Structure formats: C-alpha cells, structure tokens
C-alpha cells in the first residue's frame, strides 16, 4: 500500500470514529449538572479498534468539529462555550483516554479482558479531567465536584467499558479478518 492510500485510510478511520462519537453523544440520560451520554462508549470503541494514535486523532477531530459549531456534543451542543463550560473537561479527557486506552492495548494484547482494564482506566482519566474542570468552572468544593462529576458515572462507566471492549475487539477482529484494517508491528494500526 502506498503512502497516499495509507493517509486516506487514516483520514477515513478518524472521520468515521469522530462521526460515531457525535452520534452516540446524542444518546443521553439527563442529570442535574452533567448528563450520562454515549460519548465515552464511542471513545472506548475508537481506542480499541484504532489504537492510540488514530483513536486520539478521532477524538481531536470530534472536539474540533464541535468547537467550530457543528452540534456533535451531548444534547446537540456545539461551540467553544461547551469546551470551556462545566462539561468541557470531559471532552478534553476523551483525547487522553483514547490515547492511554489504545496505548495499553498496544503494549499488552488486544483481548476483551485487557480492553476492559484499559477502558476502565480511560474512564477514570475522562472523569478526572471532567471533574477538575467542573470544580473550577462552577467553583465547587472537591466533595461536591466528586458527587456531581464522578459518582453518578461509575456504574454506567464500567458497563460502557465492558461494551466498548466487547464491541471494539469484535469489530477490530472482523476488520482485520476482512483485510480492511492493517495491524503494524506495534499492534496498532499500520
């Protein structure tokens, strides 16, 4: 495969998973400050299917699309005001979570149990970023920030970590079998 085809494949992978994240973001359960949404499920799936580099690029693309005004954030939110608002830290956390989740899998094995561990770590990374920004934007005490920004998301987060692992490993395996996904020597996407 030539360099131009490889770049096109990377751009397509990134665009597809940025779009999936925007679609799943619209599936939400409203809570007082921060809703539970399908965004983190998409982040986990992207990291498992694409690995650290392309998964991270997909989340950067997702954030950039939303920042310029395309309504891809939870509740059809868009714009810089979302990124600097109470829930913006979670979106920044998606980038770090995708990178670390994919990196853990590249350094170990792409299996459902390892993906669950990696996605669980990714969940805590996202929650950390989100809670820090929530605390400072709303001028909350740490205890109030944890109550609003972490505790309501833990059980659902572990369920989404499992689903992202199972779906991601299944999709990744099938794409590799169909020769639609090339795996490089570092176990990530070539």
Image: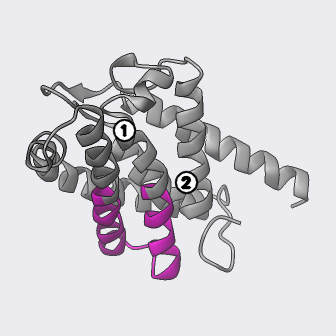
Q: Image check: 130 left or right of 2?
A: left
> Any mark on residue 137, and which?
none
Position of residue 168 measured from the top left corner of the image (x, y, whole percent) = 42, 56
Name the residue nearer the viewer: 20 or 179.
20
- Looking at the magenta stretch, what is its main secondary structure? helix
Residue 148, picture quadrant? top left
Secondary structure type for disc 2: helix
Residue 171 visible within the image:
no
The C terminus lies in quadrant: bottom right
Q: Is residue 112 magenta?
A: yes
Query: Reading the chain from its start, which is encountered first: label 1 or label 2?
Result: 1
The N terminus lies in quadrant: bottom right
Residue that appears at 39% across and 17% down:
76
Position of residue 80 measured from the top left corner of the image (x, y, whole percent) = 50, 24
| In this view, 70 is above or below 160 | above
Position of residue 175 measured from the top left corner of the image (x, y, whole percent) = 57, 57
How many marks the image carries: the answer is: 2
Residues marked 1 and 2 touching at CB (< 8 Å): no
Query: Which residue in the protein does label 2 denote?
Result: 55
Secondary structure type for disc 1: helix
Q: Which residues are magenta?
A: 97-124
Marks 1/2: CA distance? 13 Å
| In this view, 167 is above or below 101 | above
Residue 138 visible within the image:
yes
Query: Which residue in the protein does label 1 denote?
Result: 39
Residue that appears at 22% across and 30% down:
35
């Amino acid at each position: 495969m030539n360099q131009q085809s490889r770049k096109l494949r990377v751009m397509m992978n990134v665009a597809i998973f940025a779009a999936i994240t925007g679609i799943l973001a619209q599936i939400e359960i409203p809570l007082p400050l921060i809703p539970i949404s399908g965004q983190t499920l998409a982040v986990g799936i992207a990291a498992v299917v694409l690995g650290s580099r392309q998964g991270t690029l997909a989340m950067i693309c997702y954030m950039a699309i939303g920042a310029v005004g395309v309504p891809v954030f939870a509740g059809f939110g868009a714009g810089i005001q979302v990124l600097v608002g109470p829930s913006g830290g979670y979106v920044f956390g998606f980038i770090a979570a995708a990178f670390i989740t994919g990196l853990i899998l590249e350094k170990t094995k792409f299996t459902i149990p390892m993906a669950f561990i990696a996605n669980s770590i990714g969940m805590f990374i996202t929650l950390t970023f989100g809670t820090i920004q929530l605390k400072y934007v709303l001028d909350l005490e740490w205890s109030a920030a944890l109550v609003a920004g972490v505790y309501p998301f833990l059980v659902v987060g572990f369920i989404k970590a499992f689903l992202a692992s199972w779906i991601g490993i299944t999709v990744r395996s099938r794409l590799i079998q169909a020769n639609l996904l090339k795996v490089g020597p570092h176990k990530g996407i070539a």
